[in-house]
Amino acid sequence: QVQLVESGGGLVQPGGSLRLSCAASGRIFSTNTMGWYRQAPGSQRELVAVQSNDGATTYADSVKGRFTISRDNRKFTVYLQLNSLQPEDTAVYYCSLTQVSDPNSHWGRGTQVTVSS
């Protein structure tokens, strides 16, 4: 079993910042990819940023230059620094984990990020 627990969401004004954290526990393999997806009301879940254990990183075009993903492999924790937030960034942000030899994709319950004045 794998558990992912997110924290750090909240309400912020346009131009503000937040930092999300996600801690993984359970049966975690050393070769894995952790990251963040988001889903706004009425929209499909979309990739925000993911990073493999060796540092390979992918960002959505809409967040490049504003969001930064990082991870602590010893703690199986992934972070997302969100800067210059805009109302269109409002969504539920989900942590994800995929790993070698595990056919399942694992998801956290999500944390709400609301950008509003």
Image (cartoon, rainbow, N blue to C red):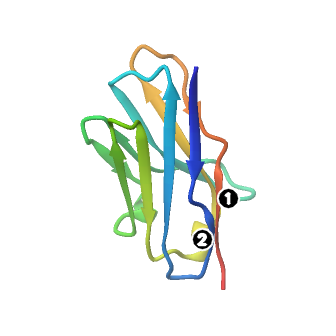
Q: Residue furthest bottom?
A: 117
Q: Where does label 2 land, which residue?
A: 88
61 on left or right of 11: left
Name the kind of residue labelled 1 in the image: Ala
Residue at (55% x, 21% y) in the render: 104
Q: Residue 3 in the image: state x and y as whole percent.
A: 58, 31
Q: Residue furthest top?
A: 101
Q: Residue 93 in the image: state x and y as whole percent.
A: 59, 53
Q: Would you place residue 18 above or below residue 49 in this image? A: below
Q: Quadrant of residue 8?
A: bottom right
Q: Residue 77 in the image: state x and y as whole percent.
A: 42, 42
Q: Quadrant of residue 42?
A: bottom right
Circles 1 and 2 in contact, beta carbons < 8 Å: yes
Q: Residue furthest front?
A: 75
In the rendered image, the quadrant that contains the C terminus is bottom right
As helix, strand or loop, the secondary structure at mark 2 comes to: helix
Q: Where does label 1 land, which residue?
A: 40
Q: Would you place residue 99 above or below residue 69 in this image? A: above
Name the kind of residue labelled 2 in the image: Glu
Q: Nearer the viewer, residue 104 or 110?
A: 110
In the rendered image, the quadrant that contains the N terminus is top right
Q: Residue 78 in the image: state x and y as whole percent.
A: 42, 46
Q: Residue furthest left?
A: 54
Q: Is disc 1 surrounded by few (<14), some (14 to 19) or many (20+) residues within 10 Å?
A: some
Q: Is disc 2 surrounded by few (<14), some (14 to 19) or many (20+) residues within 10 Å?
A: few
Q: Which one is earlier in the sequence, the residue at label 1 or at label 2? A: 1
Q: Would you place residue 108 above or below residue 58 in this image? A: above
